[in-house]
């Protein structure tokens, strides 16, 4: 197996339902424009609050993909 290099980018996905859906949103969107996704790591979770209520769940996700020339 030849040596490989992977690039890591950071995305923020949002959802009105859950942190899991927010992370899934980030990965799904990344897969539309990047090839050969490998690993997704949730690095941070937070909430958007409006008028004392949760408006959106946010997941900061690090996604890696194979780096090609």
Image (cartoon, rainbow, N blue to C red):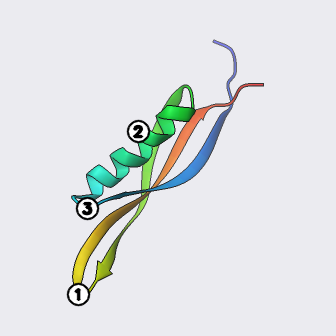
**What residue would you read off at disc 3?**
16
Q: Which residue lies furthest to the top in this view?
A: 1
Task: Find residue 38 and report its horizontal and vertical position in percent.
Answer: 50, 31
N-terminal of the pair, mark 2 or mark 1, is 2
**Label disc, if present, on residue 52 of the rendered structure:** 1
Task: Find residue 66 and report its horizontal and vertical position in percent.
Answer: 62, 29
**Structural distance between the alpha carbons of marks 2 and 1:** 30 Å
Label 1: state its secondary structure: loop
N-terminal of the pair, mark 3 or mark 1, is 3
**Structural distance between the alpha carbons of marks 2 and 3:** 16 Å
N-terminal of the pair, mark 2 or mark 3, is 3
Residue at position x 65%, y 39% in the image: 7
Task: Find residue 52 and report its horizontal and vertical position in percent.
Answer: 23, 87
**What residue would you read off at disc 2?**
28
Residue at position x 49%, y 33% in the image: 32
Q: Residues within 10 Å of mark 2 (few under 14, many from 20)?
A: few
Relative to 7, say whether 41 is above or below.
below
Query: In screen coordinates, is 26 left or right of 2?
Result: left
**Label disc, if present, on residue 31 of the rendered structure:** none
**Structural distance between the alpha carbons of marks 3 and 1:** 15 Å
Locate residue 40: give its quadrant: top left
């Amino acid at each position: 197996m030849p040596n490989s290099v992977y690039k890591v980018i950071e995305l923020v996905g949002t959802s009105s339902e859950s942190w899991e859906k927010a992370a899934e949103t980030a990965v799904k969107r990344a897969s539309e424009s990047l090839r050969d996704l490998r690993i997704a790591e949730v690095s941070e979770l937070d909430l958007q609050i409006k008028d004392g209520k949760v408006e959106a769940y946010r997941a900061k996700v690090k996604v890696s993909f194979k780096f090609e020339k």
